[in-house]
Amino acid sequence: MSKKEFFPMDGDRTKYPEIKSDGTADIDLSSHKYIKLWHGPNHPGITGNMAVELTLCGDEVVEGITHVGYLHRGFEKLMERRKYIQNFPLVCRIAVPEPDYNEYNYATCIENLTGIDVPEKGMWLRTLTLEMARLQGFLMWIGGMAGAIGFGTVGQWANYCRDLVLDRFEELTGGRIYHIYILPGGVRNDIPEGFKDRMEKNLREIEGFMKDIRRAFFDNYVFKKRSVGVGYIDPAWVFDYGIVGPNARAAGFKHDIRKNYPYAKYAELDFEITTAKDSDIYTRAFLRFEELLKDIDLIRQILDKMPEKGDHISKVSNMMNLKIPAGETYVRSECTRGEYGYYLVADGSEYPRRVNVRGPSYTHGVALLEKMLVNVNIADVAQLMVSLHTYPPEIER
């Protein structure tokens, strides 16, 4: 930590505390030398309803502690008290902006234990919804990052583009946010007539806005000044802290579940994993921007390859009376934030014995964030948090 001196409010001259090798410091938080400040839980510069309890020495952070539980919580225990089919409206809330990954992982867990097959078209429709979820998730993230630094116009552009994707979700599933579209055996509805043309129109409009967003935001001197060289993630932390997704790929790790462990129809799609090396806030932001453009291309590939005819769901017995044989399974997918996993244990009854959700937010938003906040200027806290891309209900699940 810097040894520079500062003048506290009472005029006494003091110094920053010594930071030990494990990143901690022996500090007396009751001393007048330090002040506490709550960042959140309702703040435009955070990712959802969460808060960070900051201890400040002057304008630099000495300690940051994550606080969650202000929104949805306790999902895993709630799922043990509901029948399998009753959990689909519940799992959507674990990652509100991207509910489809929860639906996919949970439905696939049930299929693995029961042997239910998914028709070809149903699998393509699942892949479509997952890529649409990634696209609107990245658009929402760009809006959040822009808002955290004060680029309000860019945030409005990004959220308008997201609304275009939500229009297509509403047409396909009947819901804009919570879809409950992926079910055991396939998906709830077939693709509507004319959907492909309407989606293509939306994608072209989004691409036009992305050109403007790149010029106004990613090429902007102010954003670069606030993000280049700030919030560095050491590649040595990736395995120690369980860092995944764009946060790991920006540090040079070529890992994407869609490519390394293909699921749904990703093995039949043409794309490469994007990586970078600088591993700062700007690198993570621009890598997500590139992945957003890649998602647009993947949606086009999916719509071109999707068969026009075929069943979208298999015939399954009454799900309210479904009893899954005793066993356990783990299913993972690649959401906007990285590997998203579900571990399901069944005991042969009508209720899950145990469901464990492995969301990227738990490691990114607690262990990693709290480590990276030390010695950060208070003005950089918001963009650092957003650059790690966390969803609080995934933590307090």
Image (cartoon, rainbow, N blue to C red):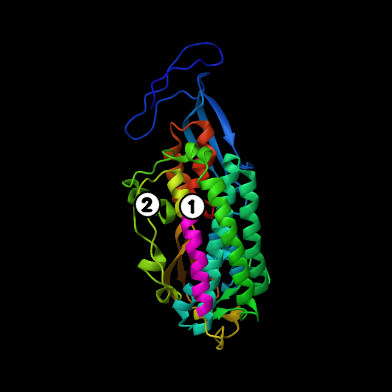
Placement of 351 over or under 365, stated as above or below: below
Residue that carries the numbered disc 1 in the rendered image:
361
Give the Cα separation between the discs numbered 2 and 1: 21 Å
Q: Please name whichever residue, 149 or 169, is drawn nearer the observer in this view of the structure.
A: 149
Q: Please name whichever residue, 273 or 65, is drawn nearer the observer in this view of the structure.
A: 273
Mark 2 nearby-residue class (10 Å; few <14, some 14–19, many ≥20): some
Quadrant where the C terminus sits is: bottom right
Quadrant position of residue 167: bottom right
Residue 37 is one of the magenta-drawn residues = no
Amino acid bearing label 2: Ala
Decide: marks 2, 1 in contact (CB < 8 A)?
no
Q: Residue at x 46, y 36 (%)?
A: 373
Placement of 19 over or under 5, stated as above or below: below
The tag on residue 276 is: 2
The answer to whether residue 86 is seen in the rendering is no
Which mark's residue is nearer the viewer, 2 or 1?
2
133 relative to 367 in the view: left or right: right
Q: Please name whichever residue, 250 or 347, is drawn nearer the observer in this view of the structure.
A: 250
Placement of 52 over or under 284, stated as above or below: above
Placement of 17 over or under 338, stated as above or below: above
Q: Could you tell me what secondary structure mostly forms the magenta stretch?
A: helix
Provide the residue span drawn in magenta: 288-304
Amino acid bearing label 1: Ser
